[in-house]
Image: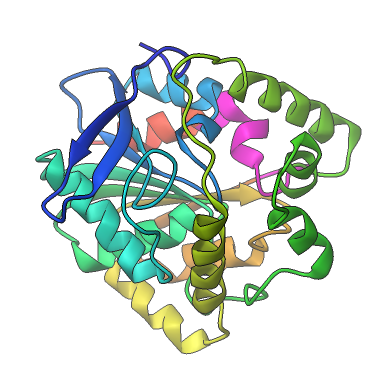
Amino acid sequence: MSQYTATTLTITSNNQTSYAYRRFGKTGTIPVVFLQHFRGNIDNWDPALVDDIAAEREVILFDNSGVGRSTGTTPQTITEMARGALGFIDALGLTTVDLLGFSLGGFIAQEVVLLRPHLVRRLILAGTGPEGGRDMHGWKDDIRSHAIKDVQGAEDIYYLFFAQTQNSQAKGQEFVGRIFTRTEDRDETPSLATRDAQDEAIIRWGIPNMGKLARLAGITQPTLVANGNNDIMVPTVNSYLLAGHIPNAELIIYPDANHGFLFQYPHEFAGEVNRFLNKA
């Protein structure tokens, strides 16, 4: 099985939400549940990253409530998105998971751990930041013009996720090629209503409040924090804040990289993820 070929399945939770998901990789391991970025769906996960992790761990990719092929309505708060993720995990009958949250998914992952600390064994926070962090209260106009465009194209991915250097942009083109290689059983593009709800939730999360950093002491799980050295969507300083306030955290910063560092360095980051998750 691979991100290129895994079948898209559905499961219905107690709240009658039907969640779309893919589950594959090394069976008999603690599954890694992936939490996706703003406007992303299952097919926006890089096969190069996911398949490398799946070689050593079972991976679960899913659409949260109202996203892609999942039913229901997309919530307007991170806490309710976390409850949606918990509804999905509960529907699968999982009692122990590892979480990998990217961007918006990293906000949700933090809330999942704080709401259900006994569920999560290890946590990976990629290209994300704490509630009330620095320069997170809405995007600058140039970033926003790409992020909320009704119909996005490859040029928006290159701008938002990759540094404005020849090497990074070339890696961006490779990434776009990978995520559009799959042609059968593709996920549905998230709706504009989902975009608007997620946008509101992100803005609320980013209201400046350094007092909110105290909440991070509640995340006692081993945590891997990673980012590019010049993230324009969730400024890199916020990764330092996470690593500094989560009691058992380690930090990796990738050079010449923007928000999508994990897609620019998919094999390298997957190797770090596997190393981190395979620790005793």
At which x and y percent is residue 28? 15, 21
Question: Is 181 drawn above or below residue 125 in the view shown?
Answer: above
**Which residue shows up at 45% across the image and 26% down it?**
50
At which x and y percent is residue 41? 48, 39
**Which residue shows up at 28% across the image and 41% down it?**
19
Question: Is 200 drawn above or below residue 49 in the view shown?
Answer: below
Foreground residue, 19 or 109?
19
Q: Is residue 230 left or right of residue 35?
A: right
- Residue 248, image quadrant: bottom left
Whether residue 129 is visible to the viewer of this picture, yes or no, is: no
Q: Which residues are magenta?
A: 254-269
Q: Quadrant of the N terminus?
A: top left
Foreground residue, 62 or 251?
62
Q: Is residue 182 left or right of residue 5?
A: right
- Residue 3, image quadrant: top left
Q: Is residue 125 left or right of residue 206?
A: left
**Which residue shows up at 51% across the image and 46% down it?**
190
At which x and y percent is residue 252? 57, 47
Question: Is 18 drawn above or below residue 246 in the view shown?
Answer: above
